[in-house]
Image (cartoon, rainbow, N blue to C red):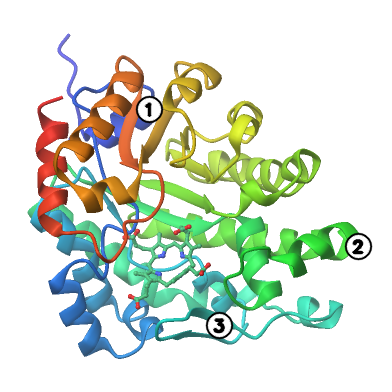
Amino acid sequence: MERSVSPVSAKPLLRALGGEAVWPPPAWLMRQAGRYLPEYRELRAKAGDFISLCTTPQLAAEVTLQPIRRFGMEGAILFSDILMVPWALGQPLRFAEGEGPLLEPLRSAEAIAALHPGTVVERVAPILETVARVRRGLAAEAPRTTLIGFAGGCFTVACYMLEGRGSKEFAAARGLAYADPALFGRLIRTLQDATVEYLVAQVEAGAEALMLFDSWAGMLSPGQFRRWVIEPTAAITRTLRRRCPGVPLIGFPRLAGPLLADYAGRAGVDCCAIDTAMDPRWAAQAVPPTMALQGNLDPLALVAGGAALEAEARSILAAMRGRPYVFNLGHGIVPQTPPENVTALMRILRSA
Ligand code: 1CP
């Protein structure tokens, strides 16, 4: 009997996340929509502030599709931000020009208890509408491209909620985790529940794969990493498997180093994203050969372009050949990236 292959299962990114060694590998780039693209800067100027851009479905969908139109990546990541979950929980948020996000930091048990997990899905309605629009846009314009929904990892989001802004140390969060683990745990559990509801809603709206960005995971001691990164991620993946069976999840425990092996074994993700500092050959040994890896080109090699870019990309490809793998950067694209270098990278990948 002839087996029919549905168009969805034929998408290269979904096949790789499902454990197939697809070659040349599917690719997308973290922060692929953004300031390095003139069409983004133009639209961003029209939208006014960043939160308005994230909550205006027509504009956010357009921005999500811009890099796909220009470069044809196999993955399109929803244009939003990990801090939209604290915003949806009722914590005041703004994005100051040139400063990044500013939240009113949580300073007490009362402030943590006053967060509103029950209304998260209601508040993110415009973002869910963006998801639906992008999915329709991809069906019309780029049927081989997979729509990736996302959220921040609980630990990383808690860092911003307690500190109120970006930081090198995130001392408020890491300090509270030691000084009052019960209270820190309540915040993590609130985030866990809100994140599950948010991700399930993204899948219901049309997201085909999900990613959890735990950008600050690498700041933790091994014991704290297990407790505040692996355990909450495992709780989220257990619930997602039940509520969204078959939807693959990419985990990004940035700067995990050798703790990646533990994370791969216990967090329940389908794919581990690796950062620039990780040796891809080590990661390929540390993670089971059936589990997908994603990463990890240095965003600055993409800025440099030319022979340096080609050499870096080829050495990562050599380490990943023969296993399920998704090409990506090791961290977000930077604003000074020449768009033509992204074009050159896509050409290198397609000839891999
Ligand atoms: O003015 C602008 O254009 C704002 C810049 C910007 C953009 C384009 C911010 C502010 N967020 C985003 C979009 C974004 N953020 C996406 C979507 C699109 C894509 O990948 O194409 C995603 C997935 C994120 C995730 C995100 N936001 C992370 C995790 C990944 C990472 O880079 O580590 C983190 C830590 C944030 C917080 C954040 N939002 C924005 C900034 C400048 C920051 C970093 C703040 C800091 O710690 O200093």
Report how far apart the C-alphas of labels 3 and 1 lie in the structure.
37 Å
254 sits to left or right of 111: left
Give the image location of residue 170, x and y in percent: 69, 65
The local secondary structure at tag 1 comes to loop
Indicate the quadrant where residue 265 lies. Answer: top right
Confirm or deny contact between disc 1 and disc 2 (CB under 8 A): no
The picture quadrant for ligand 1 comes to bottom left
Of the numbered discs 3 and 1, the one sitting upstream in the chain is 1
What's the residue type where badge 2 is placed?
A: Ala
Image vertical order of residue 254 relative to residue 194, above or below: above
Mark 1: which amino acid? Gly
In this rendered view, identify the residue nearer to me: 70 or 276: 276
Q: Amino acid at mark 3?
A: Leu
Point out residue 256 in the picture as x, y percentages from the top left corner.
60, 39
Residue beneath disc 2: 179
Choose mark 1 or mark 2, whichever is in front. Answer: 2
Relative horizontal placement of residue 112, taking residue 181 as reference (left or right): left
Residue 102 is marked as 3
> Can residue 9 be seen from the camera position used here?
no
Res. 194 mark: none
**Residue identified by numbered label 1:** 18
**What secondary structure is marked by label 2?**
helix
Task: Note whether 109 is above or below 217 in the view shown.
Answer: below
Q: Does residue 82 lie above or below 5 as drawn?
A: below
